[in-house]
Image (spheres, helix red, strand yellow):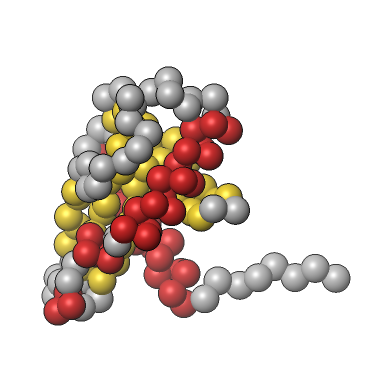
């Protein structure tokens, strides 16, 4: 009666690069809290803890960087959506105004040998920083 929706090729690719980013961030000492947090306002790829901060991470993959890197695709509109989604996450988890937050972007681009990751901490200012 109910069928499970199969992931599109772009969703499969996105999950692969999110896992790659998660592995990288864990090696950098961040602690995993949640991935693919969904709510009516949007989605956050990774939620992690780093030295007292709750870090909301957007993972962006660009096959071709001729038109900019992944960070360039996180425009003002996307930033506002991420901030609102993060606010709801914090409220639902009883953390709102109790812990400092930041928004990072992991930009992944294709290279001949392997994917290249660029981690931008505090990629944009947010309205929920204490």
Quadrant housing the N terminus? bottom right
**Residue at the farthest right position:** 1
Q: Position of residue 89 (x, y in %)?
A: 51, 38
User: Of 75 and 9, which appears nearest the observer?
Assistant: 75
Q: Position of residue 3 (x, y in %)?
A: 75, 70
User: Of 33 and 74, which appears nearest the observer?
Assistant: 74
Q: Position of residue 105 (x, y in %)?
A: 27, 52
Q: Dividing the picture into quarters, in which one does residue 74 lie?
A: bottom left
Residue 57, compared with residue 7, is above or below; it is above
User: Residue drawn at (54%, 31%), measured in percent from left and top?
Assistant: 91
User: Residue drawn at (26%, 42%), measured in percent from left and top?
Assistant: 125
Q: Is residue 88 left or right of residue 62?
A: right
Q: Look at the image and tell me whether residue 91 can be seen.
A: yes
Q: Is residue 86 left or right of residue 23?
A: right
Q: Look at the image and tell me whether residue 31 can be seen.
A: no
Q: Position of residue 17 (x, y in %)?
A: 34, 61
């Amino acid at each position: 009666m109910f069928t499970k929706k199969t992931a599109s090729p772009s969703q499969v690719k996105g999950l692969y690069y999110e896992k790659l980013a998660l592995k990288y961030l864990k090696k950098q000492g961040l602690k995993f809290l949640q991935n693919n947090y969904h709510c009516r306002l949007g989605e956050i790829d990774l939620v992690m803890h780093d030295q007292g901060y709750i870090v909301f991470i957007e993972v962006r993959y660009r096959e071709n960087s001729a038109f900019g890197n992944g960070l360039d695709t996180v425009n003002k509109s996307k930033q506002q959506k991420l901030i609102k989604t993060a606010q709801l996450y914090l409220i639902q988890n009883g953390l709102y105004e109790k812990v400092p937050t930041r928004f990072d972007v992991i930009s992944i681009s294709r290279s001949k040998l392997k994917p290249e990751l660029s981690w931008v901490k505090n990629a944009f200012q947010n309205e929920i920083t204490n």
